[in-house]
Image (cartoon, grey):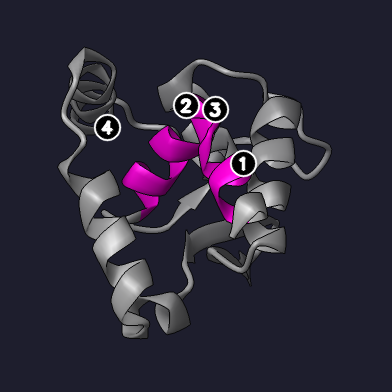
Amino acid sequence: MYKLFKTLGSKSRLRILKMLLIRKYCVCEISGILNLSDSTISEHLKKLKKMNLIREQKQSYWNYYYINPEIKRDKNMKKLLNIIKSLNNSIYQKDRKKIKNHVIKCNNINKGGNK
């Protein structure tokens, strides 16, 4: 349980989880919305995945991340996700606006990762 709360102790990881409660995202979309580097986002996703909070799905050249459906079946984890979903301070409000206005076209990024 300590490792779970340590993982959730990062504001960036909470922001990512809150986004993933809405839909699947790839690294380039998350980094564009949170204004963090792809490598930083990848590190955060790695930690969330290690805690079994998220999963990834390969589509073409990109990996899309989403909330692990199994944790939604656990009563306590479901409560925790609801708490994360209800977080509504100014940072999350800004993220929500960016999600609405931000369109990342991953299809325009070539295989080498260059934009």
Marks 3 and 1 sit apart, C-alpha to C-alpha, by 22 Å
**Residue 110, relative to residue 92: is it above or below?**
below
SS for callout 1: helix
Query: Which callout, 3 or 2, points at the residue further toward the start of the chain?
Result: 2
Q: Which residue is mark 1?
A: 6
The span shown in magenta is 4-20
Residue 87 colored magenta?
no
The amino acid type found where label 1 is placed reads Lys
The amino acid type found where label 2 is placed reads Lys
> In percent of the image, x 33 and y 44: which residue is there?
18
SS for callout 2: helix
> In percent of the image, x 54 and y 27: which residue is there?
31
The numbered dot on residue 99 is 4
Q: Which marked residue is nearer to the observer: mark 3 or mark 2?
A: 2
**Residue 108, relative to residue 95: is it above or below?**
below
Query: Which callout, 1 or 4, points at the residue further toward the start of the chain?
Result: 1
Q: Residues within 10 Å of mark 2 (few under 14, many from 20)?
A: few
Query: Which callout, 2 or 4, points at the residue further toward the start of the chain?
Result: 2
Marks 1 and 4 sit apart, C-alpha to C-alpha, by 26 Å
Q: Which marked residue is nearer to the observer: mark 1 or mark 2?
A: 1
Image position of 25 (left or right of 7): left
> In percent of the image, x 72 and y 61: which residue is there?
50
The numbered dot on residue 11 is 2
Q: Which residue is mark 3?
A: 31
